[in-house]
Image (cartoon, rainbow, N blue to C red):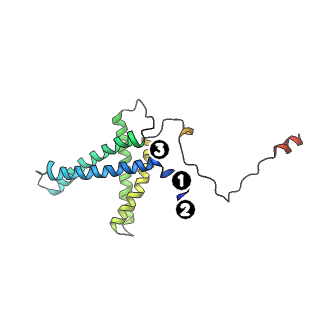
Amino acid sequence: MKRITQHPLTLWVFRKRFMKFATVGASGVVVNLVVLYLCREFLFAAIQSTAIRLNASLAVAIFFATMNNFYWNRFWTWGDRTHHRDKHLVLHFGQYALACWVGMLVQVVLTNLFVIYMHYLIANALAIVIASFFNFAVNNFWTFRSHQPVEEIALPIIPEPDDAITEPEPDIEQEIRSK
């Protein structure tokens, strides 16, 4: 277990930025639930069909949760990164929303695959975890990518395995003597 927790890739994923991303995601869940409740119980209470009332409430709740998450991810999680000055905020939100929708699609597909082998709630929870890593990667490298030259972007340093065959370094003194 220690080898996994000390692996550079694991350390890179669980750095401060991923924890911020997870915190923002948790706040989005709270926003989603509160708005869903308010819309279903009060704002759309006059709608007779429970299915239509629920779906209308879900649409509003998802919109507000996505706006919440975009704001906090842009200004807190990835606030240290420079953004294109010519990229309009609405276009940046559209890019973020597209990344979220792809992440939702990943979650749905994985849940449907996992449910064959396990209880649907466990399948969905596992799919959410995997989709969270996917969403983080997409947002880190696309939506909120740094607009610095590629060599300046912090990527994980993955060392070569211990058993890797290395080329022997040429002996400089021996080269000088041979000339």
Which numbered dot is residue 2? 2
Q: Amino acid at mark 2?
A: Lys
Are the residues at dot 1 and dot 2 in contact (C-beta closer than 8 Å)? no
Q: Position of residue 32 (x, y in %)?
A: 27, 51
Q: Tell me the residue at 54%/60% (across/down).
A: 4
In terms of sequence position, does the residue under pointer 1 or pointer 2 come before the other?
2
CA separation in Å, label 1 and label 2 = 13 Å
Please, which residue is most extreme toward the top here? Answer: 86
Density class for disc 2 (Cα within 10 Å; few <14, some 14-19, many ≥20) is: few
Q: Which residue is mark 3?
A: 141
Density class for disc 1 (Cα within 10 Å; few <14, some 14-19, many ≥20) is: some
Which numbered dot is residue 9? 1
Q: Position of residue 123 (x, y in %)?
A: 37, 64
Q: Tell me the residue at 35%/50% (across/down).
A: 25
In terms of sequence position, does the residue under pointer 3 or pointer 2 come before the other?
2
**Side of 176 where 116 appears, left or right:** left
Q: Position of residue 88 (x, y in %)?
A: 36, 32
In terms of sequence position, does the residue under pointer 3 or pointer 1 come before the other?
1
Q: Tell me the residue at 42%/39% (across/down).
A: 79
Relative to the observer, which residue lies in front, 101 or 46? Answer: 46
Secondary structure of the residue carrying numbered label 3: helix
Q: Amino acid at mark 3?
A: Phe
Q: Position of residue 37 (x, y in %)?
A: 20, 53
Secondary structure of the residue carrying numbered label 2: helix
Can you tell which of label 3 and label 1 is closer to the viewer?
1
Can you tell which of label 1 and label 2 is closer to the viewer?
2
Q: Amino acid at mark 1?
A: Leu
CA separation in Å, label 3 and label 1 = 15 Å
The quadrant of the picture occupied by the C terminus is: top right
